[in-house]
């Protein structure tokens, strides 16, 4: 049984240290990428307050395909370059969006989402997927979240 916890009052730096450590422990030695993504999506849901969707989109034949997640049912396929996830996949750069309604071409999978953080996951110089975090609060994510999830993506890239 896995029982990872962090203090709800911990500074974000500590929260992300704990999150990266827990995720690394979860994926260590497990060869099944779906199981690894599922556990990390659940861990993100557990660790991060004020989120309504945490999960992955996988790069499959030059489009993003829904991977394991926690939240409401989501868009299954996202063309590279479209929406927040597709933009992150095309550019290879994190997308921190304070107001999804102001993002050109935003794809609304959950009407409750107000802000979004999408971090590309790369292996051998190629984007293999993205970590997608949604919140019902505007401007929920900040630079600490960006840095923390980028660290997580780097830590688990070899296991997903």
Image (cartoon, grey):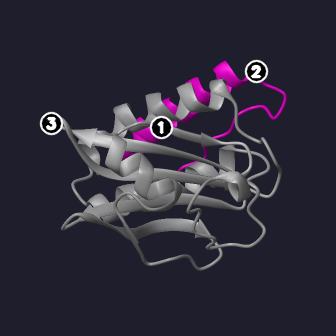
* Helix, strand or loop for disc 3: loop
The residue where tag 1 is placed is: 94
Name the residue located 78 percent from the left edge and 24 percent from the top edge: 10
- Residue 34: mark: none
Residue at which label 2 appears:
11
Residue labelled with disc 3: 124
Is residue 43 depicted above or below 82 in this figure?
Answer: above
State how far apart marks 2 and 3 are (Cα): 32 Å
In the orientation shown, which residue stands out farthest toward the front? 104
Q: Nearer the viewer, residue 31 or 71?
A: 71
Highlighted magenta segment, given as a residue range: 1-27
Q: Nearer the viewer, mark 2 or mark 3?
A: 3
Residue 86 percent across, percent down from the top left: 41, 57
* Few, some or many residues within 10 Å of mark 2 (<14, 14–19, 20+): few
Residue 101 highlighted magenta (yes or no): no
Crowd tier of the residue under label 1, counting other residues whose Cα lies within 10 Å: few below 14, some 14–19, many 20 or above: many
Nearest to viewer (mark 1 / mark 2): 1
């Amino acid at each position: 049984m896995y029982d990872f916890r962090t203090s709800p009052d911990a500074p974000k730096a500590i929260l992300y240290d704990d999150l990266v450590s827990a995720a690394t422990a979860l994926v260590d030695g497990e060869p099944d990428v779906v199981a690894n993504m599922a556990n990390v999506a659940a861990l993100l849901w557990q660790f991060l307050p004020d989120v309504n969707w945490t999960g992955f989109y996988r790069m499959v034949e030059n489009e993003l395909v829904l991977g394991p997640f926690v939240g409401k049912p989501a868009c299954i396929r996202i063309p590279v370059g479209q929406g927040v996830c597709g933009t992150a996949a095309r550019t290879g750069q994190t997308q921190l969006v304070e107001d999804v309604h102001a993002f050109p071409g935003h794809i609304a999978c959950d009407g409750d989402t107000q802000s979004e953080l999408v971090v590309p996951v790369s292996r051998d110089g190629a984007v293999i997927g993205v970590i997608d975090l949604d919140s019902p609060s505007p401007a929920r994510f900040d630079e600490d979240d960006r840095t923390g999830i980028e660290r997580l993506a780097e830590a688990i890239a070899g296991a997903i």
